[in-house]
């Protein structure tokens, strides 16, 4: 994938979402759990199912696994780092094509030592640094750090709540890093934003294309919410069409 051939990445949580992403022609998925809290590491079961589905479809390297041990910020304890390393190894053993990670120091910089450990565990896989970059003060300097560490790409909204509002920063990031690091716009992306985001020069767009559906089954006391998120096939297809249209116009 080059800047002349922009990619679509869909964030999905279940096997139906995997199949939807394959059907609409997404370039890859970010497989995760708990999108409502920003995403957490999915179960090994769904990772294996996703890899099997991608293999049957001939989609090599399609599954990229979010590895995030808990909600909240991105400063991790030694025990959480060890959990993350084990999860990365499990994802690699299951056949995932990549992982999505991120770790910061208490002063708001990329934690180089932890990131290097995670990269070592992900040997042979593509590695995306997630939206932890949107919590730093200097995204351009941070991008240089990620290049030096050997990351494949970074997922960012340009520091804004929604990617379209951070489009100037996204464009500046891409101009700054050139081909040294892929810039993927993600965070509140709507289908109608995709053309403008790709025109700004980013290499890829990332969205969940999710819809909340009611769960009619009884949950009982402590059973959780009476709704859940799923991938919306219509939105996913519209996103794929928008990426294709932007590619043809380029």
Image (cartoon, helix red, strand yellow):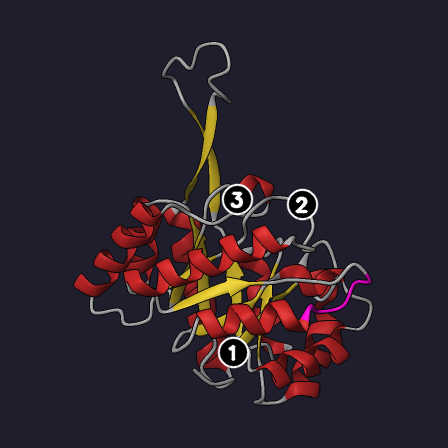
Q: Tell me which residue sits at (69%, 83%) in the image.
A: 144
Q: Quadrant of the N terminus?
A: bottom left
Mark 1 to mark 3: distance in Å? Answer: 23 Å
Disc assigned to residue 72: 2
Q: In the orientation shown, which residue stands out farthest toward the left? A: 56
Of callouts 2 and 1, which one flags the residue occurring earlier in the amino acid sequence? 2
The magenta stretch is: 107-111
Discs 2/1, front? 2
Left or right of 131: which side holds 84? left
Q: Nearer the viewer, residue 22 or 119?
A: 119
Closer-to-camera residue (244/57): 57
Return the residue found at the far top: 221
Q: Is 110 within the magenta?
A: yes
Q: Which mark is residue 29?
A: none
Residue at (21% x, 58% y) in the render:
52
Q: Is residue 151 left or right of residue 215?
A: right
Tell me: residue 155, above or below residue 82: below
Circle number at residue 35: 3
Circle 2: element type: loop
Q: How many marks?
A: 3
Q: Residues within 10 Å of mark 2 (few under 14, many from 20)?
A: few
Nearest to the eye among marks 1 and 3: give it: 1
Residue tagged 1: 152
Q: Residue at x 75, y 73 (%)?
A: 139
Badges 2 and 3: C-beta atoms under 8 Å apart? Answer: no
Name the side, left or right, on which 222 lies relative to 178.
left
In which quadrant of the rendered view does residue 230 lie? top left
Is residue 135 found inside the magenta-colored segment of the image?
A: no
Point out the tag, 1 or 3, that comes first from the N-terminus. 3
- Give how far across and how far down residue 45 sits, in percent: 30, 46
Q: Is residue 215 above or below residue 152?
A: above
């Amino acid at each position: 994938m080059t800047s002349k051939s922009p990619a679509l990445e869909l964030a999905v949580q279940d096997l139906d979402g995997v199949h939807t992403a394959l059907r609409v022609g997404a370039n890859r998925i970010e497989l995760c759990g708990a999108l409502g809290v920003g995403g957490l590491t999915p179960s090994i079961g769904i990772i294996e199912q996703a890899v099997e589905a991608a293999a049957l479809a001939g989609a090599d390297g399609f599954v990229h696994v979010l590895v995030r041990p808990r909600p909240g910020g991105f400063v991790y304890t030694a025990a959480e780092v060890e959990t993350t390393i084990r999860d990365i190894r499990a994802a690699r053993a299951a056949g995932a094509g990549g992982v999505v990670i991120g770790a910061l120091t208490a002063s708001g910089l990329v934690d180089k030592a932890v990131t290097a450990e995670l990269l070592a565990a992900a040997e042979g896989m593509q590695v995306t640094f997630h939206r932890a970059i949107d919590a730093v003060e200097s995204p351009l300097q941070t991008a240089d750090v990620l290049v030096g560490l050997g990351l494949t790409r970074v997922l960012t909204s340009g520091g804004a709540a929604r990617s379209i509002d951070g489009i100037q920063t996204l464009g500046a990031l891409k101009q700054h890093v050139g081909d040294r690091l892929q810039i993927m716009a993600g965070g509140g992306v709507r289908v109608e934003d995709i053309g403008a985001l790709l025109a700004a020069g980013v290499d890829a767009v990332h969205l969940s294309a999710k819809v909340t559906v009611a769960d009619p089954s009884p949950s009982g006391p402590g059973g959780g919410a009476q709704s859940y998120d799923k991938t919306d096939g219509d939105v996913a297809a519209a996103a794929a069409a928008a990426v294709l249209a932007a590619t043809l116009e380029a």
